[in-house]
Amino acid sequence: MARSILLRGRPLVSYASGFVSKLLWGTANHLWYLPFAFVILVLLDRLRGLVSKGNFATACGLLAIVSLATAEWWREPSFSLGFPWATFVHAMPAVFLGIFVWEDSPFGSRFAGASSS
């Protein structure tokens, strides 16, 4: 099916959501994470400066637990957001968990210390 769509010159993803969705989705289906990672890194850099390291890690750990525990309630409705938003929402628990693990790890502490000097 995908091959026939490509041969006809139609996109695999509907861009009916507008230019922003097209920009955030990327140039190919499997590259959705590149714009997502960029936006998340910029946002986290801004948020990290507002909150202490321990509180930031704890908040991300709690958000990971809550988002995974309530996934059955938000998962199905998130599909109505369309691409790329639904994909981004589904990736957020992993982002929160990764931040929690990184911030509480010795490597994360060494990295933070090295970047501040």
Image (cartoon, rainbow, N blue to C red):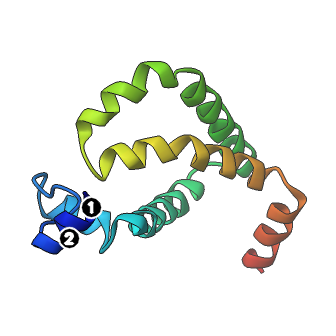
Q: Secondary structure at mark 2?
A: helix
Circle count: 2
Circles 2 and 1: CB atoms closer than 8 Å? yes
| Position of residue 57 measured from the top left corner of the image (x, y, whole percent) | 70, 45
Crowding near the residue tagged with mark 2, few <14, some 14–19, many ≥20 C-alpha atoms within 10 Å: few
Q: Is residue 64 above or below residue 57?
A: above
Residue 2 placement (x, y as % from top left)? 27, 61
Q: Dividing the picture into quarters, in which one does residue 113 lie? A: bottom right
Return the residue at label 2.
Answer: 6
57 or 20: nearer the viewer: 20
Residue for badge 1: 2
Compared to 112, does 84 lie above or below? above
Q: Secondary structure at mark 1?
A: helix
40 with respect to 12 (left or right): right
* Residue depicted at x 52% and y 54%: 47
* Residue 35 percent across, percent down from the top left: 39, 68
Q: Marks 2/1: CA distance? A: 6 Å
Which residue appears at 90% of the width and 59% of the height?
106
The furthest residue to the bottom: 117
Residue 10 vs residue 39, the one in the foreground = 10
Left or right, 109 with reference to 89:
right
| Location of the C terminus (image quadrant) | bottom right
- Quarter of the picture holding the N terminus: bottom left
Quarter of the view holding residue 114:
bottom right
Instruction: Name which residue lies at 76% across and 68% down.
Output: 112
Please tell me how crowded label 1 is: few (under 14), some (14-19), or many (20+) other residues with Cα within 10 Å.
Answer: few
